[in-house]
Image (cartoon, grey):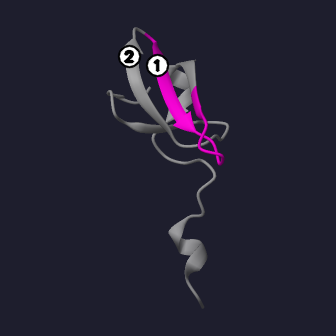
Amino acid sequence: MENLKIGDVVYLKSGSNAMTVTLLDGENCHVVWHDKDDKDHNGYYPRESLTKENPKAIPPEAFKHS
């Protein structure tokens, strides 16, 4: 389980928008995010379902030319 703190930007391991941790409650985290229409959303997820690395990010090596 990652060491999360308030203010960290996190993602669901299955993929999601970037979310900001606003509350840590035992094994759970409250997060907030904005959608493409700038609407506010929030959720409450188990810490083990979150990661600091965007699981859908393109790795830097994908941009190297041979």
Residue 28: say if magenta: yes
Give the number of the disc on residue 55.
none
Q: Residue furthest bottom?
A: 66
Q: Are marks 1 and 2 in contact (CB under 8 Å)?
A: yes
Please, is residue 46 above or below residue 11 in the view? above
- Residue 29 vs residue 38: left or right? left
Q: Is residue 10 magenta?
A: no
Q: What residue does disc 1 label?
A: 29
Q: Where's the C terminus, which quadrant?
A: bottom right
**Residue at 48% in and 19% down:** 30
Q: Which residue is mark 2?
A: 24
Which residue occupies 50% across, 29% down? 32
Q: Position of residue 7 (x, y in %)?
A: 34, 33
Element type where label 2 sits in the image: strand
Disc 2 crowd, CA 10 A, few/some/many (<14, 14-19, 20+): some
Image location (x, y in percent) of residue 19: 51, 36
Q: Indicate which disc, 1 or 2, sits on the residue closer to the N terminus.
A: 2
Report the front residue among 40 and 26. Answer: 40
**Image location (x, y in percent) of residue 38:** 59, 43
Q: Secondary structure at mark 1?
A: strand
- In screen coordinates, is 49 left or right of 26? right
Q: Amino acid at mark 2?
A: Leu
Task: Check disc 1 and give the amino acid type.
Answer: Cys
Give the overall secondary structure of the magenta segment.
strand
Residue stretch in magenta:
27-41
Q: Nearer the viewer, residue 3 or 34?
A: 34
Query: Relative to residue 21, is residue 45 drawn left or right?
Result: right
Residues under labels 1 and 2: Cα distance?
5 Å
Q: Residue at x 39, y 24 (%)?
A: 22
Q: Quarter-wise, where is residue 59 in the image?
A: bottom right
